[in-house]
Image (spheres, rainbow, N blue to C red):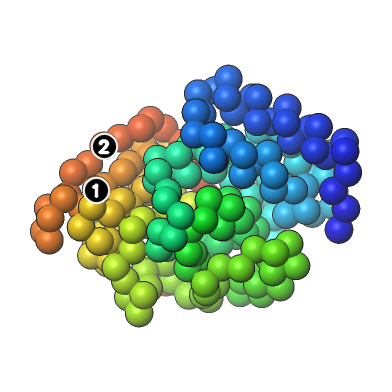
Amino acid sequence: MKDTFKHQGLRQQLVNVLKNKGIKDEAVLNAIGKIPRHLFMDSSFLDHAYQDKAFPIAADQTISQPYTVAFQSELLKIKRGDKILEIGTGSGYQTAVLCELGAKVWSIERQNELFKKTSKFLPKLGYRAKKLIFGDGYIGFKEEAPFDSIIVTAGAPYVPKSLLSQLKVGGKLVIPVGDDVQVMTMFIRTGPKEFAQEEFGDFRFVPLLGDKN
Ligand code: SAM
């Protein structure tokens, strides 16, 4: 697993692209500048690893576009030691960003192939999530709730109530909501039964799949 000066240079260019697109959080930019994204992708896509694009990974899924990863991470305003639940482990790239930001990460993936591959791969790079879980993100992970934040990295047709209920008061759920196009939406739990909601424009994700698809 090689990380060369060429890769490092391309990563810095990607960081500049993200800055130009409006990402400001230095910790997020540092994480993207540090994590070897090319190692999260199939070898046939290596030349594209530092373009600001989503790319195919196994099981018909994608590694998210770096801008999207940075945007969602910035919204969470992570503090060291925060408990974060990620829905859609995929390649593990977003998980690695959360680990770099000092979060304690639980992450759920419903494709067994990706779950197994990423469970082996992330520790090799030194990224140790608290737990990678093979399961259905719609139900969250109540064993470890409540969380400081929950991040959903697939397009959700609706907002799962179980995820809202697993937030701490003051906690945030960042979730792209919609079918063909999703609106990036943030819910902040302002009280035991109260939530504030804010929207941040359109994004495109692979779908958050349910039991029947
Ligand atoms: N965070 C990932 C990354 O950095 O590579 C993004 C991966 S992709 C955009 C979304 C992931 O969500 C896919 O790996 C997909 O298998 C997973 N997914 C879809 N539906 C799910 C569900 N119900 N529960 C958990 N994961 C799900």
Q: Does label 1 point to a residue whose CB lies under 8 Å from ligand 1?
A: no
Q: What element carries label 2?
A: strand
* Cα gap from disc 1 to disc 2, whole angstroms: 9 Å
What residue is at 74 percent from the left and 35 percent from the top?
11
Local crowd size for mark 2, using a 10 Å CA cut-off: few (<14), some (14–19), many (≥20): few
Q: Is residue 5 left or right of residue 201?
A: right
State yes or no: discs 1 and 2 in contact (Cβ < 8 Å). yes
The furthest residue to the front: 80
Residue toward you, 11 or 50: 11
Q: In this view, does 127 lie to the left or right of 135?
A: right
Q: Can residue 29 be seen in this view?
A: yes
Count how many numbered circles sit on residues in the image: 2
Looking at numbered disc 1 in the image, what kind of residue is underneath it? Ile
Q: Can residue 157 be seen in this view?
A: no
What residue is at 73 percent from the left and 27 percent from the top?
13
What residue is at 65 percent from the left and 31 percent from the top?
15
- Percent across and percent down for residue 163 are 30, 62
Tell me: residue 27, above or below residue 208: above
Local crowd size for mark 1, using a 10 Å CA cut-off: few (<14), some (14–19), many (≥20): many
The numbered disc on residue 188 is 1
| Residue 57, quarter of the rendered image | bottom right
Q: Is residue 160 left or right of residue 4?
A: left
- Percent across and percent down for residue 6 are 87, 36
Q: Name the residue under label 2.
A: 198
Tell me: residue 63, above or below residue 26: below
Tell me: residue 142, above or below residue 81: below
Indicate which label's residue lies in the foreground, 1 or 2.
1
- Percent across and percent down for residue 123 are 69, 69
Looking at numbered disc 2 in the image, what kind of residue is underneath it? Glu
Q: Is residue 103 left or right of residue 156?
A: right
Q: Is mark 1 on a helix, strand or loop?
A: strand
